[in-house]
Amino acid sequence: MIAPQAHIPAMKNLELTDDEAQALVRVIREAIDSDRFPLSPRIAVLRSILAQLRQEPARAPLPPLRNYVPPSKGRYRRRG
């Protein structure tokens, strides 16, 4: 059996102006924010589309973790 063809063929590259891209991002963001089920597969797809439309800038790397040094015994020594 042959699978039915999609109504809209797959688009590899949308050539949108900046205003069109901003409008599309705004509509997708509103759909994500107003959905009752934020972990649904539909919202996951919308988030992946949003990530492709709105490229996040590279984040600065986190500072290196500090080594834990336990407190000295002299400061917390029992008195008595």
Image (cartoon, rainbow, N blue to C red):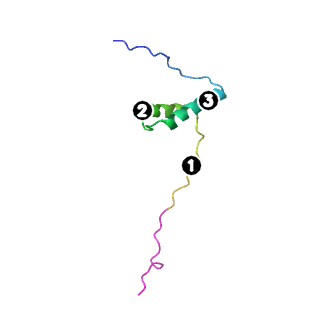
Query: Which of the two residues, 8 or 2, is positioned nearer the viewer here?
Result: 8
Q: Residues within 10 Å of mark 1 (few under 14, many from 20)?
A: few
Instruction: Find the distance from the CA under tag 2 to the CA under tag 1.
Output: 31 Å
Q: Which mark is residue 47?
A: none
Kind of element beneath mark 2: helix
Residue 45 position within the rendered picture, expressed as x and y whole percent measured from the top left:
47, 31
Q: Earlier in the sequence, mark 3 or mark 2?
A: 3
Query: Which of the two residues, 17 or 73, is positioned nearer the viewer here?
Result: 17
Residue 2 position within the rendered picture, expressed as x and y whole percent measured from the top left:
36, 12
Instruction: Find the distance from the CA under tag 3 to the CA under tag 1.
Output: 31 Å
Q: Which mark is residue 61?
A: 1
What's the amino acid at mark 3?
Ala
Q: Which mark is residue 23?
A: 3
Q: Residues within 10 Å of mark 3 (few under 14, many from 20)?
A: few
What's the amino acid at mark 2?
Pro
Task: Give above or below for 77 relative to 16.
Answer: below
Q: Earlier in the sequence, mark 2 or mark 1?
A: 2
Kind of element beneath mark 3: helix
Is residue 68 a member of the stretch shown in magenta? yes
- Visible residue check, residue 51: no
Instruction: Find the distance from the CA under tag 3 to the CA under tag 2.
Output: 23 Å
Q: Residues within 10 Å of mark 2 (few under 14, many from 20)?
A: few
Residue 77 image-quadrant placement: bottom left
Q: Do labels 3 and 1 touch, CB within 8 Å?
A: no
Residue depicted at 47% across the width and 15% down the height: 7
Label the magenta part by its dominant secondary structure.
loop
Query: Which of the two residues, 10 or 39, is positioned nearer the viewer here?
Result: 39
Boundaries of the magenta span? 67-80
Specify the farthest residue to the top. Answer: 1
| Front label number (3 vs 1) | 3
Q: Which residue is mark 2?
A: 41
Residue depicted at 58% across the width and 38% down the height: 56
